[in-house]
Amino acid sequence: MGQLDGRTVLITGAARGIGAACAHRLAADGARLVLADLDPGVEKVARELGQVAIRADVTRRDDIVRMVEEPYRRWGRLDVLFNNAGVIRVQPMLDVSEAEWDRVMTVNLRAVFFVLQAVSRRMVRQDPIAGSELRGKLIQTASIASYRGGNHLMTPYSASKAGVVSLTRSAAQALARERITSNCVCPGAVETAMWEQIDKEWGALEGLGQGEAWKRRIRGIPLGRPERPEDVAKVVAFLAGPDSDYMTGQALNVDGGLVMGN
Ligand SMILES: NC(=O)c1ccc[n+]([C@@H]2O[C@H](COP(=O)([O-])OP(=O)(O)OC[C@H]3O[C@@H](n4cnc5c(N)ncnc54)[C@H](O)[C@@H]3O)[C@@H](O)[C@H]2O)c1
């Protein structure tokens, strides 16, 4: 018996990285998954796991409607949302254009809110999860960048993630009476395609060779190794499962201690 047996979960940004690792972990724990991403790679992940893929851009209203409809069409309910898709850009604060600000905010904050809202509007009308007093669970991916110092090279990104923590708490308050919880994870420096991009952009700004910016960042991790997507997946599995049912409005750092600095 898995701790998520039969639970239905929608994961955004599931084609790779943290989203794909969570898909693997939650499937192993018994969940039924709808995996959403604009990257066609999501179909491969779903095929490997015997789960459902949906190509969707979380910034588009029609795609949100289609994506949220999918678990209701198939299973009549959605127990857990893992609202995870995100983008980044590393550049000096003085160079940030309005277009770049909007791009990052649109994916990381606006879309996270409207996906959460669309899911919540359905969840409030459904019966409780089997064997639980809760109707549903919302989980967002924020970041320690939302409050860690030294983020002037990713100003819009850090602001968007602080916004994700804030809306996680607003949703927790708004939906507690409906027996829907809302929490977020705050990863540190995770070995994914996003960090390959950060390494490249940061390296170019500071004249560093490939891999140097990454080495600098992981040097400061108290637990002494880079974070793997699977480290985040373990905490997401906890938040998706019954053991976290009495938690809401929380932002959990999963960062090997990086937020403490060194
Ligand atoms: N990698 C890290 O160090 C780190 C640290 C803290 C937080 N995070 C956050 O974790 C989440 C996952 O990041 P990751 O490291 O796995 O990055 P990643 O780039 O490997 O994966 C992100 C996924 O989101 C998808 N995506 C992007 N825009 C989308 C859109 N408009 N619609 C649908 N899908 C879209 C991408 O196609 C990709 O599959 C992001 O929210 C990121 O900000 C990452």
Image: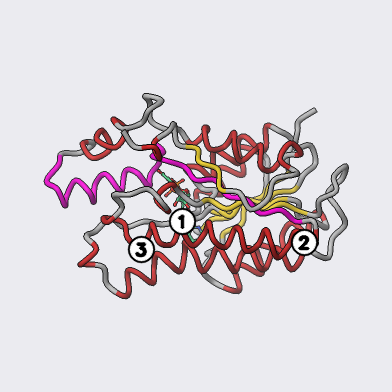
Residue 103, x across and y down, in percent: 39, 68
Q: Residue at x 66, y 37 (%)?
A: 238
- What quarter of the picture does the C terminus occupy? top left
Crowding around mark 2 (Cα neighbors within 10 Å: few <14, some 14 to 19, many 20+) is: many
Q: Which residues are magenta?
A: 180-208
Checking the image for residue 262, the label placed there is: none
Tell me the residue that label 3 is attached to: 156
Whether label 1 lies within 8 Å of ligand 1 gets the answer: yes
Q: CA distance from mark 1 to mark 3?
A: 12 Å
Tell me the residue that label 1 is attached to: 86
Amino acid carrying label 2: it is Met
* Residue 104 seen from this side: yes
- Callout 1: helix, strand or loop? loop
Q: Quadrant of residue 235?
A: top right
Residue 132, x across and y down, in percent: 85, 45
Q: Is residue 183 magenta?
A: yes
- Callout 2: helix, strand or loop? helix
- Callout 3: helix, strand or loop? helix
Tell me the residue that label 2 is attached to: 123
Q: Quadrant of residue 192?
A: top left
Amino acid carrying label 3: it is Pro
- What quarter of the picture does the N terminus occupy? top right
